Image (cartoon, rainbow, N blue to C red):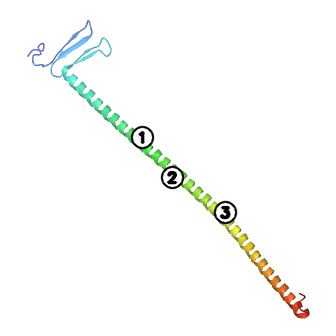
Amino acid sequence: MSSDSDSDSSQSQTQESQDNRISGTGESVNLVASRSSIGDVSISQTDHGAVDGAFKFGNAIMDGAQKFADSTLTGALGTIKASVKDSLDTTRAAQDSAYKFSNAVSDSAFKSNDAALGGAFKFAADITAGAANELAAAGARSDAVAKNALQSVKDAYGDPG
């Protein structure tokens, strides 16, 4: 076993000093990177699968988050719309009730006025009729008194006739 030979090693690595590139082969080296510029990294086929999986996983999470946000927003808008509709319906019902109450009060006032006027006219008519009856009765009594007086004169002095 000499110290110069490493034949048991399953990995080899070389460095080229002129372009600062490191490359490697073996089971544990999957990355070939250039140190000459930032971001110029090439990834082996095995790592492509992991990166693709990570992107797909990230996209799935983003899609799920977007769908959740969309459904939450849709639900919130539906709730707001229903709340506004309920509020408008309640306002309309209150306005209708107030209008109906106002009309009922006005109708009642007109009916009360009509009844009061009708009662006043009936009362006046009754008084007038009563007065006319009293006048007729007074006239009849006056006629009777006059006839009695005339008869008394006739009885006392005879018929001048």
Do labels 1 and 3 touch, CB within 8 Å? no
Residue 77, numbered label: 1
Q: Residues within 10 Å of mark 1 (few under 14, many from 20)?
A: few
In depth, the one of 113 and 161 nearer the eye is 161
**Is label 1 or label 3 in front?**
3
Name which residue type carries label 2: Ala
Instruction: Find numbered disc 3 in the image and state the secondary structure of the residue it sits on.
Output: helix
Residue lying furthest top in this view? 18
Q: Position of residue 24 (x, y in %)?
A: 19, 16
Q: Position of residue 148 (x, y in %)?
A: 84, 88
Which residue position holds label 2?
A: 93
Instruction: Find numbered disc 1 in the image and state the secondary structure of the residue it sits on.
Output: helix
Q: Is residue 27 above or below residue 5?
A: below
Q: Is residue 140 above or below residue 119?
A: below
Which residue position holds label 3?
A: 113
Does residue 28 appear left or right of residue 40 in this picture?
left
Q: Residue shown at 25%/11% (left/top)?
A: 21
In depth, the one of 83 and 140 nearer the eye is 140
Residue 149 falls in image quadrant: bottom right
Does residue 71 appear left or right of residue 157 in this picture?
left
Any part of residue 29 in sight: no
